[in-house]
Image (cartoon, rainbow, N blue to C red):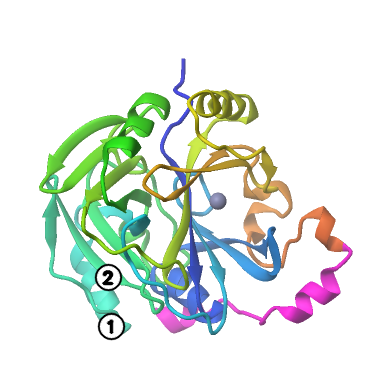
Amino acid sequence: MKPLITGIHHITAIAGDPQKNIDFYTGILGLRLVKKTINFDAPDVYHFYFGDEQGSPGTVFTTFPFKGARKGTKGTGELTYTAFSVSKDSLSFWIERLKKFGVLVSDVQTRFGDKLIRFEDHDGMGIELVANDSDDREGWTYGPVPKEHSIRGFYGATLNLRSKDETEKLLLNHMNYRFIGQEGERYRYGTEGKAGDIVDILVNPAGNRGMQSAGTVHHIAFRTANEASQLEIQQILMENGYMVTEVKDRNYFKSIYFREPGGVLFEIATDEPGFAIDEEEAHLGELLKLPDWAEASRKRIESALIPVTLNPEKYV
Ligand code: ZN
């Protein structure tokens, strides 16, 4: 039987200026804007989804951009670094590319045998690119980043927590994760232990709590096949004392949410139905898509949003 949870589905962050946000993730990083919609819980704010060509589960970084939002701070109780996966031979390409666009890049580090670089977007969002040869996903290109160097999807994520024990119990006992290894204060977990399913807990007992605002992650979603498997997980979590929400319809997937013991908001999202449900795959992300319940207010919603454009030609 397939495990109920099979890795990371998407990661959602709070951002500042929406145009700068689109330029960074589509222009500099070369991801595809697969959906331009609104925050279903705050309809005056965009919700952007950036991923591979189809917006496959495991590739999608999403943002709620608030122009003028003050910057948050990284700290405990937060997902502090989102790691994307690139080919083993791509790091020098990325170092050069990021520098070309004024992004400050760390020295190359080695972690669990893989080389990686670390940097931040203009809001201070923590990002890593992990070079590895175990990722068979293709990535995507529409020009600025050649396909062989393109981001394949997530590698994993780092949770910065004061202690690991309760979160580890959750991952191991109820979320199909297993322990993979330890390097210093970093503990690694995975469903299979490959790019797209890695969760690291960085233990920082005396760390200050992070403050959530622009440049910090709002939540991490784990993937499950469908609504039936999602209900099974919801049941398991409830039986074990986690405060899980009801199922919410996010149009492109169904979601349940709960806070893990270390303070990070977790979501379980279904692989079905995906982003081609309301626009053709060739035109994903081109129009502002609204859920049915918001269509009646389209005029008002559109007038409250700052217009944004895709500018791949500026990032060649
Ligand atoms: Zn989500």
Q: Residue furthest top?
A: 1
User: Which residue extends farthest right?
Assistant: 296
- For the record, the magenta segment spans 296-316
Q: Residue at x 28, y 75 (%)?
A: 97
Q: Residue at x 12, y 60 (%)?
A: 109
Q: Tell me if residue 66 comes above or below residue 160 in the rendering.
A: below
Q: Nearer the viewer, mark 2 or mark 1?
A: 2
250 or 246: nearer the viewer:
246
**Where in the figure is residue 308, as x and y percent of width and height?**
62, 79
Q: Is residue 280 magenta?
A: no
**Residue position for label 2:** 119
- Residue 18 location, x and y as percent? 56, 77
Q: On screen, 215 above or below 185? A: below
Q: Residues within 10 Å of mark 1 (few under 14, many from 20)?
A: few
In reply to whether residue 298 is colored magenta, the answer given is: yes
Residue 54 visible in the displayed image = no
Find out if the beta carbon at label 1 lies less than 8 Å from the nearest ligand 1 atom.
Answer: no
Asked if residue 260 is positioned above or below residue 29 in the image, the reply reads: above
Which residue, given by chain and number where applicable, does mark 1 sit on?
A: 100
Mark drawn on residue 241? none
- Point 14% across, 40% down: residue: 182
> Which element carries disc 2, helix, strand or loop?
strand
Q: Amino acid at mark 2?
A: Phe
Q: Position of residue 300 (x, y in %)?
A: 83, 76
| Dot 2 alpha-carbon crowd within 10 angstroms: few under 14, some 14 to 19, many 20 or more | some
Question: Whole-Å distance between the Cαs marked 2 and 1?
Answer: 13 Å
Quarter of the figure that contains the C terminus? bottom left
- The reply to whether residue 7 is in sight is yes
**x then y, percent, for residue 79:** 36, 56
Of callouts 2 and 1, which one flags the residue occurring earlier in the amino acid sequence?
1
Q: Is residue 238 left or right of residue 92?
A: right
Q: Amino acid at mark 1?
A: Lys
